[in-house]
Image (cartoon, grey):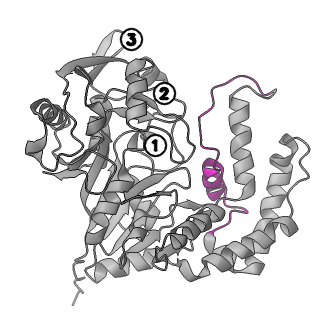
Amino acid sequence: MPVTPSSPSGRVTAVVGLQWGDEGKGKLVDRLAPGFDAVVRYNGGANAGHSVVVGDKRFSMHLTPSGILHPGVLAVIASGVVVHPPTLLGELDVLRRAGVDVSALRVSTRAHVVMPYHLEQDALRERILAGQTNAGEGEPIGTTRRGIGPAYADRAHRAGAIRVGDLADENLLREKLRLACLFKNRTLAPSLDHHPGYSVEALLPDGLAWGAALRPHLVDTTYLLHELLDQGRNILAEGANGALLDVDHGGYPFVTSSNSTVLGFGPGTGVPERRVERVVGICKAYSTRVGSGPRPTEQTNEHGDRIRERGREFGTTTGRPRRCGWIDLVAVRYAAMINGATEIALTLLDVLAGFDELPVATAYEIDGQTTHRFPPDAGALAKARPIYDALPGFAEDVSRATSWNDLPDNARRYVEFIENFVNVPVRTISVGPDRNQTIDR
């Protein structure tokens, strides 16, 4: 008789950004985490920063999943993440000193390592694109120079690429470093001024030290996640960056180097995407971006400055001021579509208090033609001129609101306009940085 496989009972909820990142995913994941058995990061690297405020403490994490703040919840870094060990170990040290138990961290042995030469390669590429070398003029991507792109590129090149599990095997690590040095000394080192070249002897001690420090946390996370689901456990997937930075579906080439949509969950974890039952898309009540690339609703004026100062819009990873502007619903609706968002969490509504009018972009004009589609190509997006609907603003401070009815009429109308246009319900509204400054509808 044919064997009928048993139906898995565990569920996956995904939290993904619907803009250019920095939407407030860390706070929402932190708030949802107690209802799950594991929180898993599936893409990106230390270029993604999450800030979580708990009481009088602010935790800024770039690699560690936000679930680490909750006892009994596994915090999983899956195979789709590229790991910079000094950053991760530094975060764990900060968390320990703050009294957080980090023993629940699990790191995939298959995740790739960001090595020192990746950071130098990233910085060199940005300098070349900026026209700061003899290579010619160009516009930099605006990366965080954390080596993310070069690490993903080496993963695809395969020869000499190093995975986290390799750090715990001296012979294997030595051989992989030999190949890596061979390639980097012929391609990268000659482009760096007065660089002595890379050697196994120089890189091996740090690699082995990282492996020893991470060894208690190393597991095959693919099997771990499947086992949890088969046991009926529930998983919260924590996306890094934002949908409009997705390497395949964002405004290319001004994107990150991984699939930052929910589409990256399957490849990044080894768990089929069909296991994701709920997708919470997060967007700010306005829009921001760090780095280069076109953004149609950016306000390089007093409105943008006011949003930046009130929203403390400075990068968690870099400290760079974010580019601020009105909400772009053409982009948000596109991002909700490709992620299959089942609900929206709207953040930082409190920042908009005091504006007499709140423009909302509902279409673009490109080459004289009106379109409601987001063009995932930087050239076309650079031509887009936003077409706005003007909504009445609200003067009231909403940071103490605890229910939908506490919000002023115009604030509620603003939220309702967003959900009606995107055709996805807004279920959560954040009105401040603290865990408790959140309204559930």
Task: For the residues labelled 3 and 1, say whether their Cβ atoms are less than 8 Å apart.
Answer: no
Three-letter residue code for mark 2: Ala
* The residue stretch that appears in magenta: 135-163
Examine the image and state in which quarter residue 361 appears.
top left
127 sits to left or right of 192: left
Q: Secondary structure at mark 3?
A: loop
Query: Could you tell me which quadrant the N terminus lies in?
Result: bottom left
Q: Secondary structure at mark 2?
A: helix
Residue in front for this viewpoint, 5 or 56: 56
Instruction: Give coordinates of residue 266: x percent, y percent.
Output: 39, 62
Instruction: Give coordinates of residue 136: x percent, y percent.
Output: 75, 24
Residue 367: numbered disc: 3
Sequence-wise, the earlier of marks 1 and 2 is 1
Q: Tag 3: Cα neighbours inside 10 Å, few (<14), some, or many (≥20)? A: few
| Residue at image location 64% in from the left, 77% down from the top | 213
Q: Magenta-highlighted stretch: main secondary structure?
A: loop
Instruction: Give coordinates of residue 343: x percent, y percent.
Output: 20, 49
